[in-house]
Image: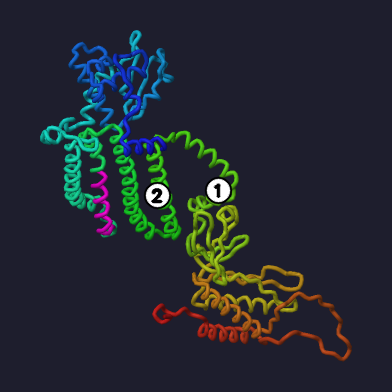
Amino acid sequence: MNQFWRKALFLLLLLPAGLLAQPQTKADLSTPFHAVKTHLYFLQPDSYQPELSARTIQGVKDLDEAQELALKLKQVYDGKGLYVVLQKIPDIVNYRDTISGKNQYVLFPNELPDVYLEKVGDNWYYSAYTIEHIRSLHRKVYPFGSDLLVNLIPKYGQNHFLGLALWQYAGFLVLVLITWIIQFFLSRLLRPVVDRLSRSRVYPATVPTRMVFSIARLASIWILMLTWQWVVPLLHLPIEWVEIIMTGIRIGATMLFLVLGVRILDVVILYVKKWAAGTSTQLDNQLVPILKRLLQLVLVFGAMIQILRLLNVNVAALIAGVSIGGLALALAAQDTVKNLIGSAMIFFDRPFQIGDWVIGDTFEGKVVEVGFRTTRIQLLDSSIIAVPNGNVANASVRNLGVRTHRLLDARLGIAYNTPPQKIQWFMEGLKKLITAHPMTAEDGNRVYFTDMADFSLVIMYRAIIETDDYGEELQVKEDLFLSALRLAALLGIEFAFPTSTIHVDTFPGQPSAEGTPGPASAEEMEAAVAALVAEFQQQAYRPLPHDEAL
């Protein structure tokens, strides 16, 4: 990156290229360094001797053809903005490539892998393979020909001003004007294409028109910016200028591609939100913004890597250093990493969704948000607690939000001195009360004499309540419990509580204890219970219709 800005400073100060300005009188092909210097030095305006530069082209007997190939190869370097730094070229007679092990040297392995030198005899030349591909490389860099603008500008345009010919200034202005006109029409031609590609029959009118126009405009600018890589070589600017301009164009195209990718991602996220809104779980809605942020980070990271590569930064070494630092950071932040993994497990396993009431080891409340690091739960007092996702993933979480019904599950303990007949009457009455309530299920209810405990006779009192509202659940339980108390009072049944009873025989002159009197006969019991159930049916809680409740 420092090298890039140094060259930019040299350009502003109009400094000449250093090594190429060193005087040389004859062709020297003894090393890769001298061969490349011979090729480029004798094509400079102040030392122009193309017949000496053509010495680097082997196997071409026709001198004019060899000179043409040498010139075209230099134009390829200039057109692609590839600045040859002679200091980096090995000045070794028997240099060997570390990969192939041969006497070869590739000037630009990434940009021009087909262009390399090889040793033939005692001298270094451009390889036969390179010479075979010079014309095709030249056509790629100059698809309109290298002399297009030179031939269009009158002869007086060859005069120079501030280091550039007048035709170069005029050509630049013409190209800018043509680019603006093409972009104006191209953006409007792309609008129906973008609109067609972003439209969906399932979710029509999802993408706003302004978003379509924005994508079309960005796409047109990006396309024209890429074409400028073919246009800039036509100006025949100095290599220092071309290198800076081409690097700027590539960086600008990368940043523009990043913005365009983010806009396209916004369109995709709109459809993902539509799909998530139609699913049964609310957790998908929470996952969409997290997915969007992750994809945006991937786009930004890819763009940064590309920009660093364009600035000649050793990306591999940088990533290796970042990886080592990332490992150290991960070791120092194990809890954060554990929470990130926990959040992934929550999204994959889906133990609950947004709005569910959950009970954990240290929390109980309604799930309001699942984030990267924490799950936010609203407690009974409406406060919010942020529980680390690592703890949530490892905890035993009871999800009350997935229940299909509510349950009244009680154990009624009655006194040991209750006669068996009354117990039977009591259980029959409880069954009729459960059946009589409008919000209890027809099946699955249980009323049984289940245990003879230390101080009570235990009766299971279980009823399935058909509601998913917590308030209605409490109201139904209240109805059933109050009705059980009334039934017990009607039958003269006492509820037991933990006590230690000392039995004393009857003293002379005292009546024996026979408990609270109840109905004298089965007929009276049936009539009393029937009256209680009828009254219960009239007074039991019933949910109001939706419009009346409002």
Range of magenta residues = 207-223
Residue assigned mark 2: 296
- Quarter in which the C terminus is drawn: bottom left
Q: Nearer the viewer, residue 492 or 118?
A: 118
Residue assigned mark 1: 337
Q: Nearer the viewer, residue 138 or 485?
A: 138
Q: Depth-wise, is mark 1 or mark 2 nearer the camera?
A: 2
Label 1 to label 2: alpha-carbon separation:
20 Å
Looking at the picture, how far across and down is residue 409, in whole percent? 61, 69
- On residue 100, the disc is none
Disc 2 secondary structure class: helix
| Residue type (three-letter) at the residue carrying disc 1 | Val
Disc 1 secondary structure class: helix
- Is 236 placed left or right of 534 in the picture? left
Looking at the picture, how far across and down is residue 36, in whole percent? 32, 20
Residue for point 17% across, 46% down = 177
| Residue type (three-letter) at the residue carrying disc 2 | Gln
Q: Nearer the viewer, residue 11 or 471?
A: 11
> Does the magenta portion include 385?
no
Residue for point 74% across, 69% down = 453
In the figure, 152 relative to 530: above or below? above
Residue count near mark 1 (Cα–Cα under 10 Å), binned few <14, some 14–19, many ≥20: some
